[in-house]
Image (cartoon, grey):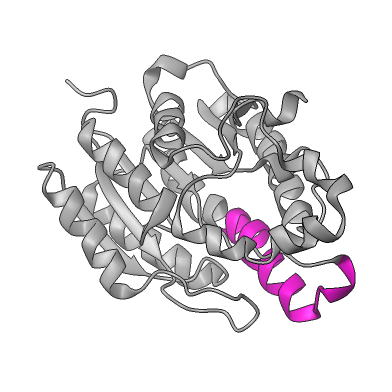
Amino acid sequence: MGRVENKVALVTGAGRGQGRNHALRLAEQGADIIALDACVDYASMNYGMATEQDLEQTAKLVKATGRKVITRRVDTRNLEGLKQVVSETVAELGKLDIVCANAGIFSAQPWDAVTPEVWRDTIDVNLTGTWHTCVAAIPHLLENGSGSIIITGSTSGVKGQPYFQPYVAAKHGVVGLMKSFANELAPKNIRVNVIHPTGVDTPALAGVGGLDGLLQLDPHQGPCFVNAMLVDMVEVDDISNAVLYLASDETRYVTGTELRVDAGNLGR
C-alpha cells in the first residue's frame, strides 16, 4: 500500500518541474492524478513555460506507474474556467483528496525595472491563481469530508529577498491565504499548509537569469540567497517528498504550517 493509496490529487503547473515531479511521486504512492497547466508563455517573462507536449509527457510518466491521470490545459488566472475543469475531472475520478497549488512564475530585476506587466503577471499567477485553485477545489474536498491543500511557497515568502519584488509580495500573500484557509477549514477536516523551498533545480531557474550580474553590482545582497548547508539548490525530489508527507494521513493533524525545505536558508 502506498502512502496516498486510492486518493485523488490535483496538481497545477504539472507540465514540468516541481508540478510534474509532485504528480509522479503521488502516483507512485497510489494516487490518481489531475494534472493541470496553462501551457502559455508570458511576454513579461524572459523564459518559456511548459508546453502541451510537456503536459502529455507528465501523463505518460504517471500512466507508467499504473495510476489514472487526466490532463487539462487551463489557466489558473481564469476562475470560471478552472472551476469547470476541476468539476469535470473530479466527477470523472470520483472524488478529490489532495490539492497541490503549485503553478508559478518569477523573474529577477531591480525594483525600478519592474514593469506593470511583470507585476501583474507575477501576482496574478502566483497569488490570485493560488486563491482560484483553492476556491475551485474546496467544494470537492468538503464533499469528500476531508482533504489536504499544499501550497508552493518560497524562501521569498518569509524574507524580503532583493530583486524579486513581485514574487516576494505574491509568496508572502500565499502564506496569508494558507493561514486563513487553515483556520476556516480545520473544523471541516481540511488541512492547508505551505512548503517553502530554497532554489530548486528545475527549468524555472531560467527566471532568475541576470541575478548573478545584479549581485556582482551589489555583493552586499548576496548572503540573502546563501543556504546554510553547502548546496546552492535542492533537488525537485526533496520538495516532492515534503508534498507526499503533507498529502498523507501521517500528517492528519498538521495544518497551518510552513514547512521549510531550504537547506537552512531561512535560519541564517
Secondary structure of the magenta portion, mostly? Answer: helix
> Looking at the picture, how far across and down is residue 51, in whole percent?
35, 74
Q: With respect to residue 40, does 63 lie above or below?
A: above
Region rendered in magenta:
111-132
Would you say residue 127 sits in the magenta stretch? yes
Using residue 212 as the reference point, say whether residue 90 is left or right of it: left
Q: Nearer the viewer, residue 155 or 72?
A: 155
Q: With respect to residue 128, does 181 lie above or below?
A: above
Would you say residue 135 sits in the magenta stretch? no
In the picture, the quarter occupied by the C terminus is top right
Residue at (61, 28) in percent of width and height: 260
Q: Nearer the viewer, residue 21 or 256?
A: 21
> Looking at the picture, how far across and down is residue 165, in whole percent?
80, 59
Q: Nearer the viewer, residue 192 or 39?
A: 39
Residue at (40, 36) in percent of width and height: 240
Q: With respect to residue 127, does 152 lie above or below?
A: above
In the picture, the quarter occupied by the N terminus is top left
| Number of marks present in the image shown | 0
Residue at (52, 65) in percent of width and height: 76
> Looking at the picture, how far across and down is residue 255, in whole percent?
59, 24
Residue at (25, 37) in percent of width and height: 31
* Quadrant of residue 215 within the rendered picture: bottom right
> Looking at the picture, how far across and down is residue 15, in whole percent?
36, 62
